[in-house]
Amino acid sequence: MRYRWSWITEEHSAASLWIPPKGSEMAAEDEARVPQLIEGLCGDRSAAVMELLGRFESARPRAPHYCLSLLGTDPGQRGRRLGMALLADNLARIDDTGMPAYLRHEIGRASCRERV
């Protein structure tokens, strides 16, 4: 792991990965390969996919912040709110640092912010 902001529940049923302030999701050399990878995977839809990725990036705050990169729950454990409990714990830890957090994920029909 590139960063120490990854968390997993004791029973390994939910996990989260945060990018810390001034961090990046990918190394520069990996990010440079994204357009070619998207082209290979999406073909004639690659321009639309790249535009969507650009929109996500442009919506990201410019001030230093923690960014939720991954939040997942074992499919067999869904509905027990384990991911939401992990997220709430993560946000409390981030609050202790005094830094903001950015959540770009949607869970079900309600955003994380609405359900935590």
Image (cartoon, rainbow, N blue to C red):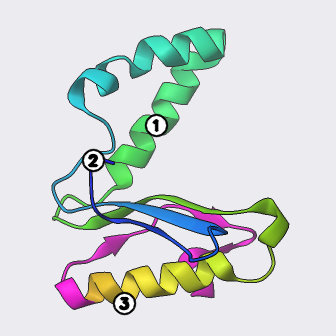
Where residue 92 sits: x, y (%)?
36, 90
Name the residue rendered at 81%, 78% in the picture.
79
Q: How many tags in the picture? A: 3
Q: Amino acid at mark 1?
A: Leu
Q: Are there few (<14), some (14-19), or many (20+) residues within 10 Å of tag 3?
A: few
| Quadrant in the picture for residue 26 | top left
Name the residue rendered at 33%, 48% in the picture.
1
Specify the farthest residue to the front: 11
Q: Earlier in the sequence, mark 2 or mark 3?
A: 2
Q: Amino acid at mark 3?
A: Ala
- Look at the numbered disc 2 and give the secondary structure of its residue: loop
Q: Earlier in the sequence, mark 3 or mark 1?
A: 1
- Look at the numbered disc 1 and give the secondary structure of its residue: helix
Image quarter where the C terminus lies is bottom right
Q: CA distance from mark 2 to mark 3?
A: 22 Å
Q: Is residue 12 above or below residue 92?
A: above
- Residue, disc 3: 92
Q: Nearer the viewer, residue 113 or 16?
A: 16
Query: Which mark lies nearer to you, 2 or 1?
Result: 2
- Residue, disc 2: 2
Q: Is residue 11 above or below residue 59?
A: below
Which residue range is magenta in the image? 96-116
